[in-house]
Image: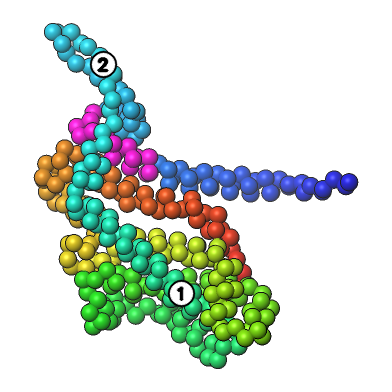
Amino acid sequence: MAKPKTVKLTGGDRLFYIGVNAFLIIVGLLIAIPMIATITQSITPNGFRGSTFDKFILRPFAEVSTHVDGKVVTETQFVWDASAYKSLLGNNGFLLAFWNSIKIMAFGVITALSLTIPMSYCMSVHDLPGRKILNYFVLIPYLFNIGVIPTYLVVTNLHLTNHLASVFIPGAIGTYNCLIMRGFFEGIPESLKESARIDGAAEWYVLVSIILPLSKPIIMTIGLYYAVGFWNDFMHPLLYLNVSSLQPLPILLRNILLGANMNENLDSNAFGDASVAAIKAASVFMSAIPMIIAYPFIQKYFTKGTMLGSVKG
């Protein structure tokens, strides 16, 4: 049995890989350092005094010196403090905002995929009458944004103000996501579609029974794009949701930041014993938890779906 041939790397190749690895390490540190600092700040007790290293990477136990009968007594105490998380979870406003964000993300992803999938499939059918016009119709708004005021007038005239649908309906079809999904559908062999059409299958049956089972990677990928977008959406809730009971998590975090910057007494009135800095850090970390949990389950589809969707365009 012949041994497989190996490709020898040149000096330039090794230098290139070293540069790529160094770049990825730097990017990883730029992501990890703020995350570690945020987690550390969220579990730091109010009034904690420690070194710079302790404030960045807070150890669970620390030695605390106290004076007892004129003598210095050193004790090891548990330092981590979960008051910020307890205050957030015990705050009705935070739980309500978190639940609103969950609903916006869930209904938004379902609505967006329900509209993006048939639109992308229609754009991928080469013999569809008016296909070029449809592609232009989708592409022009992507190149020329109509602006905030016309969008606001449309949403208000549809009486969607103070309704969660006003957050995900305007962005239900993302042009970029639609083009990626169209490229994926165009990569599916045409013979599979033609065989079903010859047997008398309607186009909706071709889409549901043949295209969708083969499109799980791109559906999961685009669904993740939409989920992240709806979860982090700030502008639409700010414009259209004027009732506090409907405001999602990004609006609540913004109110917390504004309240802290205006020196409002959040420490004792709103969030108990936790410091404002710990509350802000815990809010940021908890708002990222759903995406952190969801991404590992979608990661195996993420790269495959993106690469296959970009083969044709």
Residue 55, given in percent of the width and then of the height, sits at 31, 33
Q: Which residues are magenta?
A: 34-49
Q: Tell me the residue at 26%/66% (across/down).
A: 237
Q: Is residue 224 left or right of residue 251?
A: right
Q: Tell me the residue at 23%/30% (across/down).
A: 48
Q: How is the image coloured?
A: rainbow
Q: To which residue does mark 2 refer? A: 75
Residue 223, given in percent of the width and then of the height, sits at 45, 64
Residue 109: image quadrant is bottom left
For the residues labelled 2 and 1, the Cα–Cα distance comes to 61 Å
Q: Secondary structure at mark 1?
A: helix
Residue 127, given in percent of the width and then of the height, sits at 60, 88
Q: Which mark is residue 116?
A: 1
Q: In front: 102, or 204?
A: 204
* 10 Å crowding of disc 1: few (<14), some (14-19), many (20+): many
Whether 61 is among the magenta residues is no
Q: Label 1 amino acid?
A: Thr
Q: Is residue 37 above or below residue 235?
A: above
Residue 26, given in percent of the width and then of the height, sits at 49, 45
